[in-house]
Image (tube, rainbow, N blue to C red):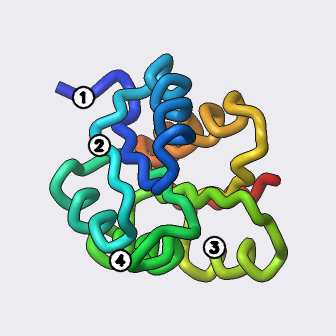
Amino acid sequence: MTPTRARVLIADDHPGFVKALERVLSLDCDVVGVVSDGGAVAETAAQLQPVVAVVDVNLPTISGLDACRSILQANPRAKVILMTAIVDDAIRNEALIAGAFGFFSKLMAASELLDAIRNAWADCALGGDSLQLNE
């Protein structure tokens, strides 16, 4: 049976932010896991098979950019949305090169992230690989 809600993995090392993000995402998504260390992201994604991984750029051990690359190397159809509190063109360009589906500021409205996850979910169903770069 095909899931009716996007399965989402959250990777962030700020517990308060994770708790708020889980609360918002649970309205439309199934949060299947949370990791706080970059070294655990790719392995957890392989194990839990989320439709979307929402990954902080600045994680301990391995950066979110490297975690994105690892996830996509293991599963090229995976959708990774990178987030950061510090948005600049260099990081945005690295996100594009790493293959991220989306790139967002942590200061954006939660509705924009939900829209990006919905788009990733729909894109997955269509087999696409479009990129969204929002601030």
Where is the N terminus found, in terms of image quarters?
top left
Task: Pick whichever of labels 1 and 4 is earlier in the sequence.
Answer: 1
Task: Pick whichever of labels 3 and 4 is earlier in the sequence.
Answer: 4
| Count of marks placed on residues | 4
Q: Give the secondary structure at mark 4.
A: helix
State the CA–CA distance, disc 3 to disc 1. 30 Å
What's under tag 2, amino acid-wise? Gly
Closer to the camera in the image, 60 or 30: 60
- Relative to 16, 112 lies left or right: right
Dot 3 corresponds to which residue? 95
| Neighbour tally class for label 2: few under 14, some 14-19, many 20 plus, Cα within 10 Å | some
Residue 104, x across and y down, in percent: 70, 54
Residue at 50% in and 28% down: 25
Dot 4 corresponds to which residue? 70
Question: Residue lying farthest top?
Answer: 27
| Neighbour tally class for label 4: few under 14, some 14-19, many 20 plus, Cα within 10 Å | some
